[in-house]
Amino acid sequence: MSGSIPIRNVYVMLAYAFSSLRSPGQDRFASEEFEHLHELFAAILIDGVSRQVKRGLQHGYVTRSEELATVRGRIDVTRTATQRSLTRGRLVCEHDDYEPDTAHNRALKAVMTLLIRHGAVSRGRKVELRNLLRYFTEVRLIDPASIRWNTLTYHRGISGYRLLLGVCELVVKGTLQGQAGGDAVLSEWLSDEKMHDLYERFLRNYFTVHHRELKPAASKIPWDKDEDRSPKDDHLPQMKTDLVLRSAGRTLIIDAKYYGKNLQVSRFGTESINSGNLYQILSYVRNEEAKSGGTVGGWLLYARTDAPRQPDLDVMLHGNRILANTLDLNLPWEELRTQLENIITEFWPAPATTP
């Protein structure tokens, strides 16, 4: 399904997902036609890394241990003795060097190299990537599969790396398919698993940017359990929502779904909402209502597929409104944004005006 989404919309989703809406060049990426997703990724990296090089690549302190003729940093007495360094007139010292060989830069170098060697990238962009790699000569080249993405952190000084490394992670986790004849293989489209992650982050950050008054968050909902009669509750699964919006005594829980097929089919050929999805959103809604009160609704928001029939549900269950429909990621961005805004007006309708 991800192959049918306009690549410019994938960029807009990336920009929201990785909080880079103010990045220079955004309008160009959103309007330019890219033949392959790899071309988009390469263009983002070329633009972003070029800007980062002008500001200066991130540097960090790297601890080194080596034999030296003069003291530098801290003397490692134990290693100096065991290696008999003093007999050679030397000391084993540990010291910190301030250099660009950081985890963030290693990830950038690894993925730029991966795109050059195995990506469906034009010759011109490959040349630009190679030219940028000259600034990474002091950075080790590592196996992209060895990158620990969850350990990479960001602060104000390196905020420009957030989108760049988000793209890098998608290249490695979303399109790297494995090995073929000893070479890495990059598919032209993101895996559905990574598209689901991107879709979820995009939705949450869209409302964070445009509707802060709704306090968008991925909240955990506590179970409405009887504390006195629940001595063993350690194995209750967590109820972690994709997105919760709250305002004026109303709460809307949105569950993002990105599947190849959005409807289940019974053995009799009857199509319906996936029962697991429906039970899940209803459980979220009922337990949230028990905790916070007010009006609580649930919305299953599927990414639209090419199937002739799509989820279309609007029912009251146990007094709670439950909706299920689709977001068409194939639409031009302005029309896609209108669909998102319609979610707000559907659940928080404007008060009727008196004639």
Image (cartoon, rainbow, N blue to C red):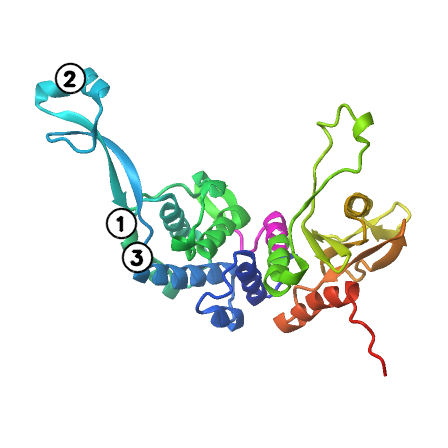
Which residue is label 1 attached to?
137
Instruction: Report the span colored magenta.
Output: 186-199
Percent coordinates x, y for residue 293 in the rendering: 80, 49
Left or right of 291 in this view: 175 = left
- Looking at the image, which is closer to me, 238 or 11? 238
Between residue 350 and residue 342, name the one nearer to us: 350
List the residue tagged with mark 2.
84
Looking at marks 3 and 2 on the same chain, the residue that comes earlier in the sequence is marked by: 3
SS category of the residue bearing label 1: loop
The alpha-carbon separation of the residues under discs 2 and 1 comes to 34 Å
Q: Residue 307, percent across and down?
A: 76, 60
Label 3: few (<14), some or many (≥20) within 10 Å? few
Query: Which amino acid, by three-letter code, is at mark 1?
Result: Thr
Compared with residue 342, is residue 62 higher up or lower down, i.e. above or below?
A: above
Q: Is mark 2 on a helix, strand or loop?
A: loop
Amino acid at pointer 2: Arg
